[in-house]
Image (cartoon, rainbow, N blue to C red):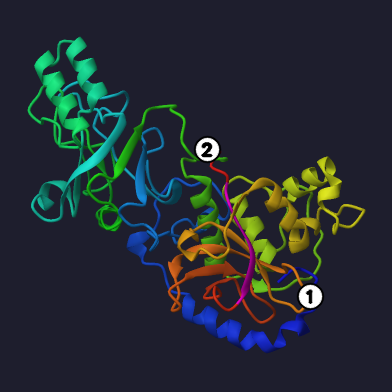
């Protein structure tokens, strides 16, 4: 709950909260460790944290971005990044693919046009998804450069326009896939390789026709990445929240004097707001600094903040975070549970007084209720955990990272 709230107000809820939290927390599977080159809080926990494909990720709602520069594949649901995997590329990773045998991974817009589970397992790992390479742009460039004929160019364009697999027998190359097999080095002939566990998870979230965009070096991403580690902010914040669960801070709302920038209470303690502050710092956003600066720019937007600013505590109060999120993040419906995506931040009303007094982050995992768990630090006697809160705790607001 909010730092400074009377803990006695929650006495009747503590037992239930602890029971729900205990049921929700599970140990991470070592085979699923994220393995991303992440920059953020508590780096010693990177080898324990992971984010899975959420239930909302289903064919028809998903698309894929491959960031060649950062060696990251991002799965998106309705355009929102929800999970990222490390990848390996062709043995000549830089530059767009020009012809067969050049070892380059193609760049551009494609779609999945073939899905294989077992037929080519020995060659492509646990799963294989063929991309609609070459596309019309590849064909036009190939024809102008003398790599293919005009007739071959036209045949490729017709197939792409009809949504079919383009011809795979030209000098442009063929069988460009997203597949398993490992990510140690850039080893493929032009494909995008994942770890086998990751490709199995990805395979279940996509289908024929799923859009795949492969970004070239320095090409602009369709999402924010504040700390430039290749991980979208929405996922990076969730990874930070997951670290707070592993860390397991004991609920303690005592006042602690902390530095004005990057300040934190001792990591063995915290309240609900500290989960949010720590999670967002994992993505390169410092709420301690942001709240103070925004208050200076627009004091009227913070009517409940004390007249004298205090960087040790102002950002640790829900009443002060609420206007910041309202001003800077995307407001989403509180009633559409199908739209609750991992990394969303929710404000909750848990006390008799009207208005939000608690805050948490939506997890990638579902609870027994069938709804997403909420990463939070509930109250006295609890530690940071993923809890099955949706449906019995009143959600007042839900916010999402802006894409840019």
Residue of label 1: 353
User: Over which residues does the magenta segment extend?
Assistant: 393-401
Residue under the point 62% across and 50% down: 281
Identify which residue, 2 or 209, lies in the foreground. 209
Residue 163 location in percent, x, y?
20, 37
**In this picture, residue 370 sits left or right of residue 134:** right
Using a 10 Å C-alpha cutoff, classify the residue at mark 1 as few (fewer than 14 neighbours), some (14 to 19) or many (20 or more).
Answer: few
> Along the polypeptide, which appears first: circle 1 or circle 2?
2
Q: In the picture, which quadrant includes the N terminus?
A: bottom right
Residue of label 2: 228
In the image as oriented, which residue stretches furthest toward the front? Answer: 162
Identify which residue, 327 or 32, lies in the foreground. 327
Residue 237 location in percent, x, y?
55, 53
Quarter location, residue 227 = top right
Measured Cα–Cα span from mark 1 to mark 2: 41 Å
Is residue 149 visible in the rendered image? The answer is no
Q: Judge whether residue 400 is colored magenta.
A: yes
């Amino acid at each position: 709950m909010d730092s400074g709230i009377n803990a006695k107000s929650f006495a009747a809820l503590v037992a239930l909260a602890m029971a729900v939290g205990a049921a929700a927390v599970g140990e991470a599977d070592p085979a699923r460790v994220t393995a991303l080159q992440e920059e953020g809080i508590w780096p010693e926990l990177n080898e324990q944290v992971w984010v899975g494909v959420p239930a909302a990720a289903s064919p028809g709602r998903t698309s894929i971005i491959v960031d060649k520069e950062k060696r990251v594949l991002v799965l998106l649901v309705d355009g929102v990044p929800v999970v990222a995997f490390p990848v390996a590329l062709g043995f000549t990773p830089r530059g767009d693919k020009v012809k067969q045998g050049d070892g380059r991974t193609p760049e551009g817009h494609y779609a999945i046009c073939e899905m294989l589970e077992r037929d080519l397992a020995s060659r492509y790992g646990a799963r294989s998804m063929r991309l609609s390479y070459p596309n019309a742009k590849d064909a036009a460039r190939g024809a102008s450069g003398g790599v293919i004929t005009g007739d071959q160019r036209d045949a490729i364009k017709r197939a792409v326009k009809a949504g079919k697999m383009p011809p795979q027998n030209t000098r442009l190359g063929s069988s460009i896939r997203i597949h398993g097999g490992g990510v140690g080095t850039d080893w493929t002939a032009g494909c995008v390789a994942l770890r086998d566990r990751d490709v199995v998870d990805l395979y279940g979230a996509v289908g024929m026709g799923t859009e795949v965009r492969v970004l070239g070096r320095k090409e602009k991403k369709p999402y924010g990445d504040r700390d430039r580690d290749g991980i979208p902010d929405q996922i990076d914040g969730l990874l930070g929240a997951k670290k707070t669960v592993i860390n397991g801070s004991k609920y303690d709302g005592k006042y602690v004097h902390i530095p004005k920038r990057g300040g934190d209470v001792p990591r063995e303690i915290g309240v609900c707001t500290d989960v949010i502050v720590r999670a967002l710092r994992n993505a390169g956003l410092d709420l301690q600094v942001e709240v103070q600066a925004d208050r200076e720019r627009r004091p009227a937007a913070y009517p409940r903040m004390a007249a004298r600013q205090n960087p040790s505590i102002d950002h640790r109060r829900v009443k002060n975070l609420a206007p910041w999120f309202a001003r800077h993040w995307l407001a989403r419906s509180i009633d559409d549970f199908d739209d609750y995506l991992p990394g969303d931040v929710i404000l909750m009303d848990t006390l008799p007084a009207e208005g939000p007094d608690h805050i948490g982050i939506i997890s990638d995992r579902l609870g027994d209720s069938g709804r997403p768990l909420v990463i939070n630090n509930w109250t006295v006697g609890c530690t940071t955990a993923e809890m099955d809160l949706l449906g019995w705790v009143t959600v007042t607001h839900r916010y999402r990272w802006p894409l840019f």
